[in-house]
Image (cartoon, rainbow, N blue to C red):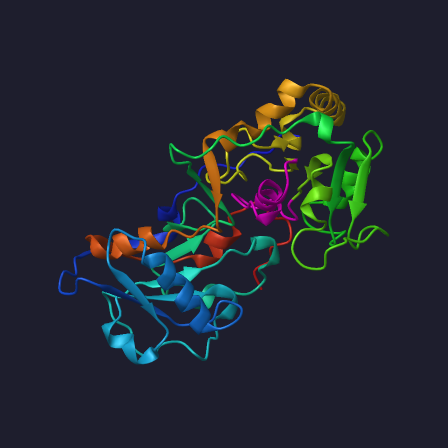
Amino acid sequence: MAFNLGHVEEDNYVYKFEDIFNNTTRKTKKILVWTPYFKTVEKWANEINNDLQKCDYACTATHNRGNLPLSDAIIFHDADIDINDMPGLRIRRQPWILYTLEPTALIKKNYNWMNGMFNWTISYRNYSTILGSYGGYVPKSMNTPAPPLVCLKNKNRTMYASISNCHDAGRRFKLIKEIMKYIDVELFGRCSNRKCTNFHGPCHPKEMLNLYKFRLAFENSHCRHYVTEKYWSTLAESDTIPIVNWIKGQINPTVIPNSYINFFDFKNINDFVNYIEKVSDNETLFQQYFEWKKKYQLGKAYTDYCKLCEKLHKPYQSQVYTDLGGWFKEDTCTKYSLL
């Protein structure tokens, strides 16, 4: 079950100019939000502004296109870009930023027309200009009370999974069916005749989820650094150990150490099953997967807009992505196609 993804740098896909930009004329940098983020552009701009208020450097976000000449950067959500609705004015000192959290398995458009257009990226890949993530965590303050112990004696169910896409690039359903030959797995969602009891949010109420020892929180794509809410929601919604299917190179640098079991850490399914049975019967070993709760607490989905703000305040070298198609395609996702 060994996979290998080589090390990648952003520099492999960009051309760096000699100019160094150091805009010190405005103490507050302005970020223009050009596209919606799935819903409305106003909502996205407000969300960015809320995050910027917590930063050490001063920045503000606006969706008012009249601010185009005065903006220090422009941000675009990849899925909402319209080739016929791009800014008519291009200012050299004004980086254009491409924002995407979609796995490349779901991206099938042609990026050749974007070559030479975007200067920075924000995505879940750790070699993006700015890191974005589906979740995050922060250290607990010194006076935070210790969390209650997570005890095996309170759990009378072994494992559950909830999936609705039965034929995805990650082959989750095939792998889960194999695991079900050895372990009692309760399967919910459209790939099963058992439905979730909640229509919004978690599949079941927290008191029900806490009856399970493990959750198969498998991703639908094996993209580099692609770790989504399936892992993060397991930590947030229950005292259940997430079992993930991350291949080598997929693990995002934002995940919490020792908070999960990775199926692909085992040589074969027998070794995996033997370990799950061992954890199921060992209180000390089981509780080790919740030690992180003593030191950390979960944060929200994480995009480091403060890092973006800081970058705009400091001197930076001008660059442009010359091969966006290559940047997206450099992955292990099997369904990517460049049309």
Check if residue 303 falls in the magenta segment: no
Whether residue 91 sits left or right of residue 78 in the image: it is left
On screen, residue 130 above or below 23: above
Q: Residue at x 47, y 44 (%)?
A: 136
Res 35 seen here: no
Q: Nearer the viewer, residue 237 or 124?
A: 237
Q: Residue at x 73, y 36 (%)?
A: 212
Can you say which quadrant of the picture contains the N terminus? top right
Q: Residue at x 26, y 52 (%)?
A: 310
Question: How many numbered tags mark residues here?
Answer: 0
Q: Position of residue 243 (x, y in %)?
A: 66, 35
Check if residue 235 falls in the magenta segment: yes
* Furthest residue toward left: 25
On screen, residue 62 above or below 204: below
On screen, residue 229 above or below 70: above
Q: Position of residue 319 (x, y in %)?
A: 29, 56
Q: Answer with the quarter of the image where residue 185 lies.
A: top right
Q: Which residues are magenta?
A: 219-240
Whether residue 187 sits left or right of residue 331 in the image: it is right
Can you say which quadrant of the picture contains the C terminus? bottom right
Res 95 seen here: yes
Q: Answer with the quarter of the image where residue 9 lies.
A: top left
Q: Answer with the quarter of the image where residue 34 lies.
A: bottom left
Q: Position of residue 173 (x, y in %)?
A: 77, 45
Q: Position of residue 302 (x, y in %)?
A: 45, 50
Whether residue 176 sits left or right of residue 286 in the image: it is right
Whether residue 304 sits left or right of residue 313 in the image: it is right
